[in-house]
Amino acid sequence: MSRRTVNITLDNLDDLPSRCRKCVFWELDPVSHDRAVEAGDTGFEKESWVSATLLEWGSCGKVVYVDSVPAGYVMFAPPMYVPRSVAFPTSPVSGDAVLLMTGQVLPEFAGGGLGRMLLQSVAKDLTRRGVKAIEAFGDLHHNPDAPACVLPADHLKAVGFKTVRPHHRFPRLRLELKSAVSWREDVEVALEKLLGSMTDPLLRPV
């Protein structure tokens, strides 16, 4: 069984799960997001965002393949490229950090270590680019039966993220990249839970 991680590009964007391919929760501010949903052109907006971010900043996501079948993904970018980030009560993201937006390992591939593989690939990529840390907005009320595009705070903490700005619903958490690069197998289950929880994302307003 071969496993490989590659950068998200316009060529493989359609390998994201269908709902994620059309989701622009993070890529647009709340008002623009609602307009795009109403107009029915969220897929185009997603493609435009990926294209612009690739051109201006570089790699903004990873897809992991198992025997050429897409099995999961993560997306990330500096906060200036993520309009939704300023809508959170615990914004702004620190100036030396990149925002972990969202991600998912498909249920049929859960338990295979793909979560660690994806996030370590992100950590190594960002370290080479001089980034110091990853930050994320966590959801303390995350309901696994009704997932959204915000990662569960408890799962982020389980893999080493630390709260830098507390909130009763959406704390902001931070992970120093030197920790992520050296993730060991003892965090395997926690990483699988982190990305495995994001099944069939549903948009939920912040």
Image (cartoon, rainbow, N blue to C red):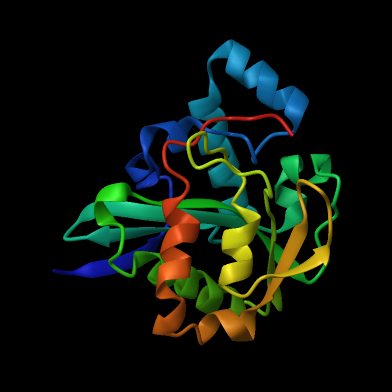
Q: Which x, y percent locates residue 138?
A: 68, 53
Q: Quadrant of residue 3?
A: bottom left
Q: Which x, y percent locates residue 169?
A: 76, 46
Q: Residue at x 53, y 15 (%)?
A: 40
Q: Nearer the viewer, residue 166 or 35?
A: 166
Q: Which x, y percent locates residue 136?
A: 68, 58
Q: Which quarter of the image is occupied by the C terminus?
A: top right
Q: Which x, y percent locates residue 204?
A: 63, 30
Left/right of residue 88 with respect to residue 116 in the rendered view = right
View extreme (left): residue: 1
View extreme (top): residue: 38
Whether 134 is drawn above or below 172: the answer is below
Q: Quadrant of residue 34?
A: top right
Whether 155 is drawn above or below 205: the answer is below
Task: Residue 137: tell me if it is visible.
Answer: yes
Q: Nearer the viewer, residue 74 or 155?
A: 155
Q: Residue at x 19, y 56 (%)?
A: 68
Left/right of residue 69 with respect to residue 1 in the rendered view = right
Task: Residue 8: tell me if it is visible.
Answer: no
Q: Which quarter of the image is occupied by the N terminus?
A: bottom left
